């Protein structure tokens, strides 16, 4: 039991090194249209993937949806982000265990507790933010989507992950991928023609 606890602690530390740094660095995080970031941690069969992207990459705009067609684009983008099987093709032994997509709040830094779970209350169609005077039409206003996905993988020897974001959302031109797996840390720049990650010892 003690051993399991220790392993769990190690895992938390690894995740924290990766994700807490991102969380604390949030105000400074890069926001370049066309670019996204993937952070991947694979530890003892548990695969955690975090995607950060400007909303422009997945919707083509970064303001609250203002008409029927923008509302549809927004809803479709959100639905697709909540369907990781459309975004990643993984080693067959991996089973999705959790999806968490944060709803961006226009004109504000979003806080950490706005995660929307599959069964949670949903802020879609939450038009209240449009009432915030002065935020709409701000020059340089930006919006980001943050999504995290968890899989449990029975085969722990290696993980092959084809990133299909470039096909699904043509707004993506380049994705920086950083990963920790098999006690190693590495990174790569993905694009439409190089979009597969192989995590192996
Ligand atoms: Zn932007």
Image (cartoon, grey):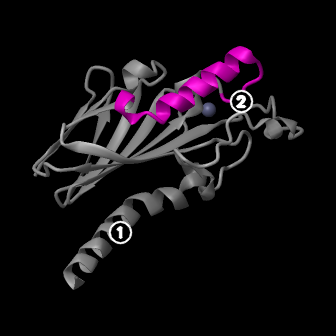
State the residue at coordinates (45%, 35%).
Answer: 36
Q: Secondary structure at mark 2?
A: loop
Q: Position of residue 100 (x, y in %)?
A: 49, 47
Q: Position of residue 101 (x, y in %)?
A: 53, 43
Q: Position of residue 197 (x, y in %)?
A: 23, 37
Q: Quadrant of the N terminus?
A: bottom left
Compared to 74, does 97 lie above or below?
Answer: below
| Disc assigned to residue 129 | none
Compared to 180, does 10 lie above or below?
Answer: below
Q: Quadrant of residue 91?
A: top left
State the residue at coordinates (68%, 19%).
Answer: 70
Q: Label 2: which residue?
A: 63
- Side of 82 where 164 appears, left or right: left
State the residue at coordinates (50%, 36%).
Answer: 53
Considering depth in this image, is 42 or 35 the residue closer to the camera? 42
- Side of 131 where 126 appears, left or right: left
Q: Looking at the image, which residue sits at the far bottom?
A: 2
Q: Quadrant of residue 123?
A: top right
Q: CA distance from mark 1 to mark 2?
A: 35 Å
How many residues crowd around disc 2 within 10 Å: few (fewer than 14), some, or many (20 or more)?
many
Considering depth in this image, is 178 or 139 the residue closer to the camera? 178
Q: Is residue 82 magenta?
A: yes
Q: Label 1: which residue?
A: 12
How many residues crowd around disc 1 within 10 Å: few (fewer than 14), some, or many (20 or more)?
few
- The magenta-colored residue range is 62-86
For ligand 1, which image quadrant applies?
Answer: top right
In terms of sequence position, does the residue under pointer 1 or pointer 2 come before the other? 1
Considering depth in this image, is 166 or 190 the residue closer to the camera? 166
Q: Main secondary structure of the magenta part?
A: helix
Considering depth in this image, is 197 or 187 the residue closer to the camera? 197
């Amino acid at each position: 039991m003690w051993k399991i606890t220790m392993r769990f602690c190690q895992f938390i530390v690894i995740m924290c090194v990766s994700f807490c740094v991102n969380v604390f660095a949030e105000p400074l995080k890069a926001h370049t249209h066309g670019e996204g970031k993937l952070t991947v941690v694979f530890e003892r069969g548990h695969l955690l993937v975090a995607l950060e992207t400007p909303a422009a990459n997945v919707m083509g705009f970064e303001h609250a949806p203002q008409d029927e067609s923008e509302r549809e684009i927004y809803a479709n983008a959100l639905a697709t982000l909540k369907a990781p099987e459309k975004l990643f093709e993984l080693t067959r032994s991996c089973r999705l265990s959790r999806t968490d997509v944060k709803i961006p709040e226009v004109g504000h830094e979003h806080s950490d507790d706005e995660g929307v779970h599959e069964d949670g209350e949903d802020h879609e169609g939450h038009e209240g933010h449009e009432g915030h005077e002065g935020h709409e039409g701000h020059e340089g206003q930006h919006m980001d989507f943050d999504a995290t996905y968890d899989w449990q993988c029975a085969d722990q020897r290696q993980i092959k992950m084809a990133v299909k974001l470039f096909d699904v959302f043509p707004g993506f031109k380049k994705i920086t991928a950083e990963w920790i797996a098999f006690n190693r840390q590495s990174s790569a720049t993905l694009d439409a023609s190089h979009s597969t990650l192989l995590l192996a010892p």
